[in-house]
Image (spheres, rainbow, N blue to C red):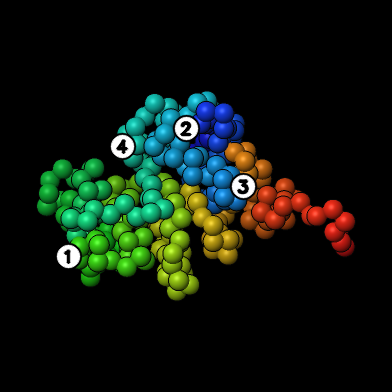
Amino acid sequence: MLQVRQLTKRFGGLVAVDAVDFAVAQGEILGLIGPNGAGKTTLFSLVAGAIAPDGGDILFEDRSLAGMSSAGICRRGLARTFQIPQTFASMTVRETVMTGAMLHHRRIDEARGAAEAVARRVGLGDRLDVPTPSLTTAEKKRLEVGRALATAPRMLLLDEVLAGLNPSEVGAMLELIRALRAEGTTVLFVEHNMEAVMGICDRLVVMDSGRKIADGAPAEVMRDAAVVRAYLGDPAPGADHA
């Protein structure tokens, strides 16, 4: 469904994403992981159209996204959330979700109805008239997902939707993500919560220093020597290797 081919991004002399290749199959939940500074956020922003690549290509449903704006990519059926919720302080939950629904519903009453249905879907049906600054962190995360869902995406890019949540809130969010996948939504998932990643992802792509260093089933990837080094570093000289 999504193909990333030799994707490259430079910031001056820093190569933040270095000729990365990977694919996401339809209906898959793919986790993109790696230590801080690995290039995950930059790669995520490239796929979402927030920044332009310096090389390579991104194909969504066999069509290149090259040169497309974030809005254009969203219209194609690929929507993202933000690690730090991008709420509109002057808006209610209903109005915020409506900003996504209006991508396909030009009439206000249709957009309102679609937004209310999505808000219920993400567990905010009883918070429709609440101003977004009054929401809890968990509710703001659900609102991020709701606004993205309101654009009727075929693929969701989820950027650390579990950050700042307590264990019960994490469990509820994972349940929502699994339900969305069961309904046909493909997911690219950037996350630092490794327990959650191992439990929900079908496959993992691991980055370190801008390069892809592993790609495969979660259990297999986490045994990979390069992945262990990326997270834990090389053992100290003279350390016991038994």
Q: For the C terminus, give its image quadrant.
A: bottom right
Q: Secondary structure beneath disc 1?
A: loop
Please tell me how crowded label 3 is: few (under 14), some (14-19), or many (20+) other residues with Cα within 10 Å.
many
Along the polypeptide, which appears first: circle 2 or circle 4?
A: 2
Q: Amino acid at mark 2?
A: Leu
Residue 154 shows up from this direction: no
Q: Which residue is mark 3?
A: 206
Q: Which residue is mark 1?
A: 129
Which sits earlier in the primary sequence, circle 4 or circle 3? 4
Give the spatial CA distance, label 1 vs label 4: 27 Å
Residue at point 49% right, 52% down? 189
The residue depicted at 53 percent of the width and 44 percent of the height is 40
Q: Which of labels 2 and 3 is toward the front?
A: 3
Image position of 198 with respect to 48: above or below: below
In the foreground, 36 or 183: 36
Looking at the rendered image, the disc whose residue lies closer to the viewer, 2 or 4, is 4
Query: Residue 102's image quarter?
Result: top left
Left or right, residue 230 beside residue 193: right
Q: Does 242 sit left or right of 112 as displayed?
A: right
State which mark lies toward you, 1 or 2. 1
Residue under numbered circle 4: 71
Dot placed on the residue nearer the N-terminal end, 3 or 1: 1
